[in-house]
Image: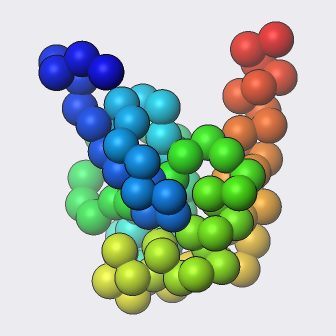
């Protein structure tokens, strides 16, 4: 890791990684918790590794709701995050 890139911690495993290596989940304007797929969404966010075990641990343990201070966590959040990781893997080849 270099010092010129932002570093964030995974809410599940607490590992510090460059920000672009993690998925960001943020509170939407309606109060729901959503995957932040693009740059520019401001506000409270939480980061998770692009790893199935971290995603499942973060959702199952309520880490997103805690970090995001009680936002409404959709039941299918883990599935959507896992799908995003799978699509990225397919796109990378």
18 relative to 59 in the view: left or right = left
In the image, residue 15 sits, relative to residue 68, either above or below, namely above
Q: Quadrant of the C terminus?
A: top right
Q: Where's residue 82, x and y in %?
A: 75, 51
Query: Can residue 92 be seen at all in this image of the molecule?
Result: yes
In the image, residue 39 sits, relative to residue 35, either above or below, namely above
Q: Nearer the viewer, residue 46 or 52?
A: 52
Q: Where's residue 88, x and y in %?
A: 71, 28
In the image, residue 49 sits, relative to residue 39, either above or below, namely below
Identify the image quadrant of residue 74: bottom right
Q: Where's residue 38, x and y in %?
A: 45, 37
Q: Quadrant of the N terminus?
A: top left
Point out the residue furthest to the left here: 4
Query: Can residue 47 be seen at all in this image of the molecule?
Result: no
Please tell me how many numbered marks the rendered image carries: 0
**Snapshot colouring:** rainbow
Point out the residue furthest to the top here: 93
Q: Residue at x 71, y 39 (%)?
A: 85
Identify the image quadrant of residue 16: top left
In the image, residue 89 sits, relative to residue 16, either above or below, namely above
88 relative to 65 in the view: left or right = right
Q: Residue at x 55, y 46 (%)?
A: 49
Q: Where's residue 76, x and y in %?
A: 75, 71
Q: Residue at x 45, y 81 (%)?
A: 65
Q: Residue at x 39, y 88 (%)?
A: 70
């Amino acid at each position: 890791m270099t010092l010129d890139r932002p570093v964030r911690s995974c809410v599940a495993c607490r590992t510090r990684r460059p920000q672009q290596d993690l998925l960001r989940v943020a509170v939407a304007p309606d109060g729901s918790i959503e995957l932040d797929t693009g740059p520019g969404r401001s506000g409270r966010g939480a980061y998770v590794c692009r790893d199935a075990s971290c995603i499942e641990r973060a959702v199952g343990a309520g880490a997103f709701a805690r970090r995001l201070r009680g936002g409404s966590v959709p039941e299918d959040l883990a599935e959507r995050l896992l799908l995003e990781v799978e699509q990225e893997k397919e796109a990378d080849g």
